[in-house]
Structure formats: C-alpha cells, structure tokens
Amino acid sequence: MAMALVDSDPIFREGLILRVALNGPLGQIIGYRANKNADVIDVDRPGHYPAEDFWEPIRARADSRLILDPEEFYILASREKIQIPSDLAAELAPIDPAIGEFRVHYAGFFDPGFGQGPDGAPCARAVLEVRCRDVPFLLEDGQPVGRLLYEDLADAADKLYGATAASNYQGQGLKLSKHFRDYPEG
C-alpha cells in the first residue's frame, strides 16, 4: 500500500496542490505579517526573540478571507497535512504565475521524512512564506496556492527528517521559525 502524501484526497496538477488555511474559530491566529523595520536576528539564537517584536498576528475572520497588502511578507499554513516519503524530496512551486502577482515559495524545500507521523499518517502542515506585488491580492480559505514537486532520490534516505529531537518543524502547524518564542495568545 502506498504512503498517503496528504491527510485528504490529493489534488494533482503538475504536482500535488496545496491550499491555504484561513479558517478557524473567530480570533484564532491563522497567520502572521512581518513588522516593517524590525531588528536583525542572530540565527545562532533559537528561541531567543519575542515574536511580537517581529510579527503581527492575523486572526480568523467570519468570511475566511485575507487581503494581502503589496510588498508585505506573510507566514501562513497549508490546509493539508503533508508527509514526504523516504525515497523522495519535494519543493514548493507556484500554483500558476498567471493567477496574480503573489508568491508562496520562498523557503519551500522538504526533506525525506518531513511530516511522517508515528502512525504513518501525514502530521505536518507546510508553512507558506507569502508576498504579493504591486496590488492587493485576495486569498480565500482553501484556495490553491502552491504545488509540491517531488524528486526521486537515487536511494531511500538513511536518516529521515524528524527522526531525532533536533527536527524543529516535524509535526508543525502554523509556526514561525525556531528563532522566535511563541506568540502570546490574547
């Protein structure tokens, strides 16, 4: 039996389609927008920086929509939980450049083993780094925003992402990088 790539019915169109998650209980954090002119960070200091000094939370709305402002940088999550089999790696690519001036694939590489849950089911959402250009762009919950393109490896990986405690993003939902402390709720 083949390993499930996502926790729902997969949609393929020149890769596995990923959709944006903007739905949730009213007021729940569903994304982040980068603060302009925030300080620099030292990448050798994980867990050091207060998220609120660098990020503004985006909270769920009744209409499950988000208008991206031009030249702003956002962190969002995929609706689907994904996993990468041991004999593949994946890259997040644009869904279709013709649909608008926004980009969702700044850091979109996935190692073999990413998102593999202990029960064999997908357990991690893809975190989406998003920016739009020139004009505002409307996103709706479930809108396709990217494609996972898979690459065959010469052999199955000996060490899988998430197999050690040092895997910072295994099993993730919406998450900022390891350098930031969790955003305070409220």
Image: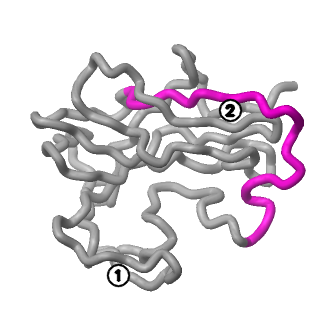
Query: What residue appears at the point 30 percent right and 59 percent down from the top-left corner?
Result: 32
Residue for badge 2:
5
Query: What residue appears at the point 80 percent right and 33 percent down from the top-left corner?
Result: 153
Instruction: Using the image, determine if residue 169 lies above or below residue 74.
Output: below
Residue 78 point in image, percent of width and height: 46, 41
Occupied quadrant, residue 137: top left
Residue 23 point in image, percent of width and height: 34, 44
Occupied quadrant, residue 180: bottom left
Query: What residue appears at the point 50 percent right and 83 percent down from the top-left corner?
Result: 45
Looking at this view, is 9 or 74 the one in front? Answer: 74
Q: Pick whichever of labels 2 and 1 is earlier in the sequence.
A: 2
Instruction: Judge the density around disc 1: few (<14), some (14-19), many (≥20) Cα neighbours within 10 Å.
Output: some
Looking at this view, is 86 or 138 the one in front? Answer: 86
Residue 111 in the figure: left or right of residue 179: right
Q: Amino acid at mark 2?
A: Leu
Looking at this view, is 93 or 181 the one in front? Answer: 93
35 magenta-colored: no
Looking at this view, is 121 or 145 the one in front? Answer: 145
**SS at mark 2?**
loop
Residue for badge 1:
50
Give the image's coloring scheme. one colour
Occupied quadrant, residue 130: top left
**Residue stretch rendered in magenta on the structure:** 144-165
Query: What residue appears at the point 20 percent right and 66 percent down from the top-left corner?
Result: 35
Residue 139 in the figure: left or right of residue 167: left
